[in-house]
Image: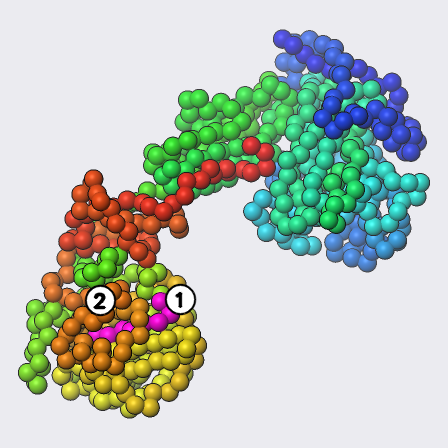
Amino acid sequence: MAEFCFAPLRRSIMHAKFTDKISQMKKTRSPHPHSRVAQAACTVSAAALMLGVSSAATVGFNLQVDWTDAGSAGYTGKPVTATAFGIGTNGWENLNPLPTGYNGKNPGPYTTNEVIDATTSTGGLNPLPNGSLTVSWACTAANSSGFAGYGIPYGGPNPNPGNQEVYYGFLRDEANFYSHPVGGPIPYSVTLTGLRSVWTNTPYAIQLIASTDTANVITNAYIGNVTTNQQATYDVKSSSTGILGGLSTMSGPWTNDTISIWGAPALSYTNGYAIASTISGFIITDKPVISMSPNSLRAVGGDTFVLGSYAVGVPPLSYQWRRNGYPLTGGTSQTLTNLQPAATDSGAYDVVVTNLYGAATSSVANVTVDRIQFTPGSNFVVDSNPNGGEHDGQAWGATWLASSTDSANVTRTGVMSFSAAAKNQIVVPGQTNLDSGTGTVMFWMRSPGVSNPSGNPVALLDRAGPDGLMILQNPDGTIQVQPALASTYALPSPTALDSNWHHIAVSFDQLGATMNLYVDGAPVAGFPSMPLWHWQPGQELELGTSHTASYQSFNGQMAEVRFYNQVLSDSDIASAYSSGAVVNPSALRLRLSFQAPPTTGVSLQWQAADVLLQSADSVQGPYTDLPGTSSPYDAAAQTAKKFFRYRGHTPQVLVSNPFRM
């Protein structure tokens, strides 16, 4: 078994003067950001390594900022209060904050140190598993960052518990400071002595955590001593311009008692933002720690999904990905890639990382591979709109009549009867091609009276909430229109409480703030000007009962409901009333003619927002678009004698953890 250590320090950095220490570090830095200094190796017995299993240890170090001198004490500190980067709160050492030097107050550079041992439990420190560490750290100035982690909102001076508390404070470098330090610019540095008292018979590995507030790149850092070092590099994510953060590559194994961490020289400002060399914290461990678990994601047919997790621990690290707790064949790399996911690939994924000193399991990432799901349904009323995108509705209690003749001997065929007492309703699910800013809504109605003559208006048609349009019947039988939930508009329309059939139509232009009401083919005079309003996108269409309980339910019959995306002319509306003609058929978007009783069908559901549904009469096609469809899409039996598929989704590579892939 191969074992590793590095040559001992020639000189104790801890006891050198601070400026001499930095000078020594600069002399031994790699001359190029991607070069490495040769490592001097020695060996440790296999038996000694095996003993390390019993004393495996993990410690996290949180570098904090002190805003007290700058007059912002509330921004000072931020110790870890929840599991961060895979380490529980009792495994974090919250080191003394260093000042900002803001406005030249108490200017840097700053240096300090703390001793931590197996009994330390105050001042933000926690007891070590064993041994004693002396930690010394220095910087030009400290500061706080708005970086909160990928896709996580920033919590301001009250960062979200966990990872963001570590990202919050960072040590600046010579290109990112508020006041010029005494003695010239210097980078940050951290030195630890006593590591062999904690990791007594095992090597250890180190991973760095960085953030900043004024940079567009975080450059390299170094881990080592005056004779030997390893380079740590960052791939970082920005939450906004200049706000960066992320994890470094993991170091190789170390066995030295003293180790230093320092930043590569930062580069000059570009467009106001520098290439920064900063640090927020770091992790030292022998056993595996999963410092970033995979994130949940949703994929659609054609997508590729990649799950990734980052771990730190003495190499070599072994990975085993699992789905629903069962190992995946071939899932033994740091990342898991599925090029053509099927629905059976949905599940709860995690990864187990092991090395000689222990094992760690990531949190679960829930992966959903989207597909069209079918649910049986009943009482569907069929949309006979000839323009595709059949928006079938569902009848909730309303009953079908083949025909209905009123006292004036007017007969309507295909009728739905509503009971106010039972709150009968027909609902057409929200579809985007009903969202037109110009349009005309019309229907036939027959009403013998309202349930409560002294109550609120009756909801005939409701597509509002919080914006939209309602067509209401007043208790005296007159019709009113209410757009945008504004003040109601009582109109001198003819009464509709005579048990006869009446044709109601409303045309609208939202941007022009115009609206017209028609009763029995004739415009109602004196219709007031309307406020600007708009549809709430995808709002469902309700007939007979409103989702707002204050309105009465309809007691009567309804027939031939139409929805156009065009303002129809007076003559068109008069023709629709007198002859029943389907005027302007190209503009028709919904037609519930009720020529057959409600039937069985299916409800189609999916999750991806950019999916366009297509249908065909046979599995071979040809398929045509169903414009304006969104999930759920309800299809009546005569419509459902079709085949459906996705179209319009752009295949993507979905990466669950975008820091380093």
Q: Which residues are magenta?
A: 436-443
> Magenta segment: does it hold 524?
no
Say which residue appears at 22% left-offset and 89% top-offset: 494
Q: Is residue 559 above or below residue 28?
A: below
Closer to the camera in the image, 389 or 373: 389
Q: Which mark is residue 585?
A: 2
Residue 165 coordinates in the image, percent (x, y) = 67, 45
> Which mark is first along the chain, 2 or 1?
1
- Give the residue at mark 1: 536
Question: Relative to 593, is 7 on the left or the right?
Answer: right
Residue 19 coordinates in the image, percent (x, y) = 91, 33
Q: Secondary structure at mark 2?
A: helix
Q: Is residue 3 above or below residue 186?
A: above
Q: How is the image coloured?
A: rainbow
Q: Is residue 67 above or below residue 83?
A: below
Type of amino acid at the residue the image marks with label 2? Pro
Task: Look at the magenta stretch and give its main secondary structure.
Answer: strand
Type of amino acid at the residue the image marks with label 1? Gln
Closer to the camera in the image, 415 or 622: 622
Q: Secondary structure at mark 1?
A: loop
Residue 414 coordinates in the image, percent (x, y) = 11, 69
Q: Is residue 362 above or below residue 589?
A: above
